[in-house]
Amino acid sequence: MREVKDTKDICKIEDVEMRIYHSFRVYRRLPFDAPKDYACYLGRFIKTDVNDIQEHERFIGRDIALAEEVGVEWWHDMPVDIEDKTLICFRCGAPAGTAGYWSGVRSWKIVAAEFHIHRNTAKNRWNTAMKAIFEYVCRKNC
């Protein structure tokens, strides 16, 4: 797996995709023991309790900080509509739509079936959302 870059070092859309995949992998693996007033917009969006998930990987503080940056700062302000956020969550393995369980990255076939669209449409929506997030991150870096 490629190295996940800090926000200031992001220079390609693929870097944004890696950060989002990485963030969901961290959220999927870590138990949610945050204080009650913890403002993670990603956690509020997917509305699930992950305390029963076993910890399969060990993450260092940098991994957790990068995941929290995506979940707290990016997720709330990114210029992507709610349907595309749901598609992003579902693709990355979060419980969204009719799937009430965490999984790994879901295939485009499964994503397309969940959203009742063609695979190419799902990929195009994903790519459009990634471009919008990349532009948001670039504006944030300037």
Image (cartoon, rainbow, N blue to C red):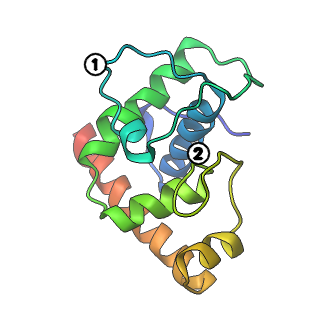
Q: Is residue 82 left or right of residue 26?
A: left
Quarter of the figure with the C terminus: top left
Residue behind mark 1: 37
Spatial CA distance of label 1 from label 2 is 25 Å
Picture quadrant where residue 82 is located: bottom left
Q: Amino acid at mark 1?
A: Asp
Decide which of tag 1 and tag 2 comes sooner along the chain: 2
Q: Which mark is residue 119?
A: none
**136 to 71, vertically: above or below:** below
Q: Residues within 10 Å of mark 2 (few under 14, many from 20)?
A: many
Classify residue 80 as left or right of residue 97: left
Question: Which residue is drawn at the image coordinates 53% and 17% (left, top)?
Answer: 62
Count of labels shown?
Answer: 2
Local packing at callout 1 (Cα closer than 10 Å; few below 14, some 14-19, many 20+) is: few
Residue 139 position (above or below residue 88) = above
* Quadrant of image for the N terminus: top right
Whole-percent x, y for residue 98 in the image: 57, 63
> Residue 120 appears at what percent x and percent y?
59, 83
Q: Nearer the viewer, residue 135 or 38?
A: 38
Amino acid type for the residue under numbered disc 2 = Tyr
- Residue at 47% of width from left, 27% of height from top? 66
Pick the front one: 63 or 46:
46
Q: Secondary structure at mark 1?
A: loop
**Do callouts 1 and 2 mark residues in contact (Cβ within 8 Å)?**
no
Residue occupying the far right of the picture = 56
Q: Secondary structure at mark 2?
A: helix
* Eye-nearest disc, 1 or 2: 1
Q: Position of residue 109 (x, y in %)?
A: 70, 75
Q: Mark 2 sits on what residue?
A: 21
